[in-house]
Image (spheres, rainbow, N blue to C red):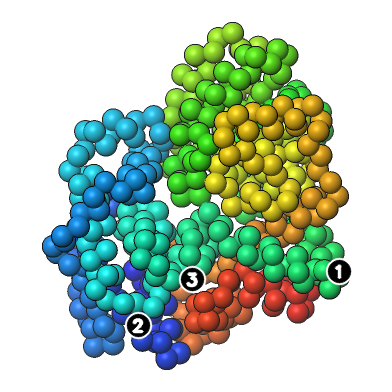
């Protein structure tokens, strides 16, 4: 996808080899599901890989495969979500797959090639970029299927996220790191106070729109927005953080339709649906037509408010005015719990089960919980709010690695000029190297360093 992912992988390979690890590079130049736009880039990378064969073992994916992934439901789901990623939304994905059967077959064949390689060559561990998009998704799928240990990573400008045996953009390390932090806080209450304080400071920064993303375009002011009973903060559906997270409902559009159908039986209940404010940014827009969903419920027009991503509305003002928050996988679910609001989930969300949200496992359970919350019977206790703060601290301060060593083009042009001995000597990257070599949760490694000095980097 025209990023420096191959160079980050090579840089990590060199660092691990310098520490005594036996490293193999897997060279995978195939065009799969529209992941290569510039063939010349792949050819240039191929020449680079050839030049490294004296330093590393290099293996190619087998050109033939006996198993083209069959009709595995997990592969079908992965293909469907890659279509959502490609189309920037759900609405056109199904038709896209019907119209591009060769892309579907190529993806299946790719999974089969990965399976054949990993079945025949017993790696102890794989480093996988992404973990959902095309090749990364194929490798992660086969690692899960064959029980191979793996780590994934994802990135943004100046940021890296890493995860043991999960998709990094979906923060799967949070439960393990949360359990470790709770255990430490039981005997080190000063650490709990530090983490809670810093979590709240970060939330306040985000509510003011002063964080690195600066998504909020209006000030935070209680009463600025009309109150509502239910607030539905939407994710950017095609973003990696939201892919493969569906559970109770087969799609986000179906989820909204079922909520609106349920609303018809609840006279007087109001709903605000907030499109992700990031969708106003170039390249982050969606193709899904939310207005067409709402048009199917004209009788609810007075009780349903849809707030577009580019409207000058502070999402946290909506949280303050809502009784119940219904996220998909957005971190605003953690933030809402920190603010004392009940949060009901129906997805495979990374912060579900941590003591500050409620989760329905069927549509009936989900809507029963919403009714309970509206009736005031789902209460965020002081202990639950503390848990939300600790989870948020992990998410904001430990899971995200602020560093120049990312595959983002602007970052790459900076770190490629830094000597490896200097680059890997920074505290953040030393944490990363320890986590990779010892296969620890990076979030725990980082928390231990933070707690030792009661500081953050």
Is 335 displayed left or right of 187 in the figure?
Answer: left
Q: Is residue 422 above or below residue 359?
A: below
Q: Name the image quarter holding the N terminus.
A: bottom left
Which of pointers 2 and 3 lies earlier in the amino acid sequence? 2
- Which quarter of the picture shows residue 312? top right
**Tags 1 and 2 touching, CB below 8 Å:** no
Q: Is residue 17 above or below residue 93?
A: below
Taking the spot 61% from the left edge, 80% from the top edge, the residue there is 427
Residue density around tag 2, few if under 14, some if 14–19, many if 20 or more, within 10 Å: many
Query: Residue 273: which disc?
Result: none
Q: Which residue is mark 2?
A: 23
Is residue 232 at least partly visible in the picture?
no
Give percent across and percent down for residue 64: 13, 62
Q: Is residue 90 visible?
A: yes
Task: Tell me the tag on residue 405.
Answer: 3
The first of marks 1 and 2 along the sequence is 2
The residue shown at (46%, 80%) is 418
Q: CA distance from mark 2 to mark 3?
A: 20 Å
Identify the secondary structure beneath mark 2. loop
Give residue 123's quadrant in the image: bottom left
- The mark that comes first in sequence, 3 or 1, is 1
Looking at this rendering, what residue extends furthest in the top direction?
A: 299
In front: mark 2 or mark 3? 2
Crowd rating for badge 3 (residues with CA inside 10 Å; few <14, some 14–19, many 20+): many
Q: Answer whether labels 2 and 3 touch (C-beta < 8 Å).
A: no
Disc 1: which residue: 189
């Amino acid at each position: 996808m025209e990023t420096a992912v191959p160079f980050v992988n090579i840089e990590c390979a060199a660092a691990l080899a310098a520490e005594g690890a036996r490293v193999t590079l897997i060279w995978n130049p195939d065009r799969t599901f529209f992941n290569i736009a510039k063939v010349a880039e792949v050819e240039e990378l191929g020449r680079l890989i050839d030049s490294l064969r004296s330093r590393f073992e290099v293996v190619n994916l087998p050109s033939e495969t006996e198993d083209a992934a069959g009709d595995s439901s997990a592969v079908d789901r992965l293909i469907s979500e890659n279509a959502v990623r490609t189309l920037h939304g759900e609405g056109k994905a199904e038709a896209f797959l019907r119209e591009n059967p060769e892309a579907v077959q190529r993806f299946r064949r790719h999974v089969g090639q990965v399976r054949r390689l990993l079945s025949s060559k017993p790696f102890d561990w794989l480093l996988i970029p992404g973990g959902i998009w095309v090749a990364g998704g194929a490798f992660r799928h086969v690692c899960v299927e064959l029980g191979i240990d793996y780590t994934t990573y994802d990135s943004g400008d100046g940021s890296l996220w890493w995860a043991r045996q999960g998709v990094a953009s979906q923060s799967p390390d949070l439960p393990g790191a949360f359990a470790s932090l709770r255990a430490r806080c039981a005997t080190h209450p000063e650490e709990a106070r530090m983490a809670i304080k810093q979590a709240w400071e970060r939330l306040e920064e985000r509510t003011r729109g002063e964080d690195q993303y600066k998504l909020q375009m209006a000030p935070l002011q209680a009463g600025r927005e009309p109150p509502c009973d239910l607030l539905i903060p939407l994710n950017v559906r095609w973003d990696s953080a939201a892919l493969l997270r569906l559970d109770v409902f087969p799609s986000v559009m179906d989820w909204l339709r079922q909520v609106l159908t349920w609303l018809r039986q609840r006279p007087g209940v109001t709903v605000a649906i907030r499109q992700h404010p990031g969708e106003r940014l170039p390249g982050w827009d969606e193709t899904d037509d939310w207005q067409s969903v709402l048009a199917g419920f004209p009788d609810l027009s007075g009780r349903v408010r849809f707030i577009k991503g580019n409207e000058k509305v502070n999402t946290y003002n909506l949280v303050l005015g809502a009784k119940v928050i219904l996220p998909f996988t957005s971190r605003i679910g953690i933030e809402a719990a920190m603010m004392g609001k009940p949060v009901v989930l129906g997805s495979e969300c990374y912060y579900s089960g941590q003591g500050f949200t409620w989760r329905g496992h069927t549509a009936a359970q989900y809507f029963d919980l919403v009714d309970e919350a509206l009736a005031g019977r789902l209460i965020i206790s002081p202990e639950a709010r503390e848990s939300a703060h600790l989870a948020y601290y992990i998410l904001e301060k430990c899971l995200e690695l602020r560093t120049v060593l990312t595959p983002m083009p602007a970052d790459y042009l900076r770190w490629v000029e830094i000597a490896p001995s200097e680059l890997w000597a920074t505290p953040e990257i030393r944490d990363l190297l320890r986590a990779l070599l010892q296969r620890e949760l990076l979030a725990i490694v980082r928390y231990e360093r933070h707690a030792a000095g009661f500081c953050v980097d």
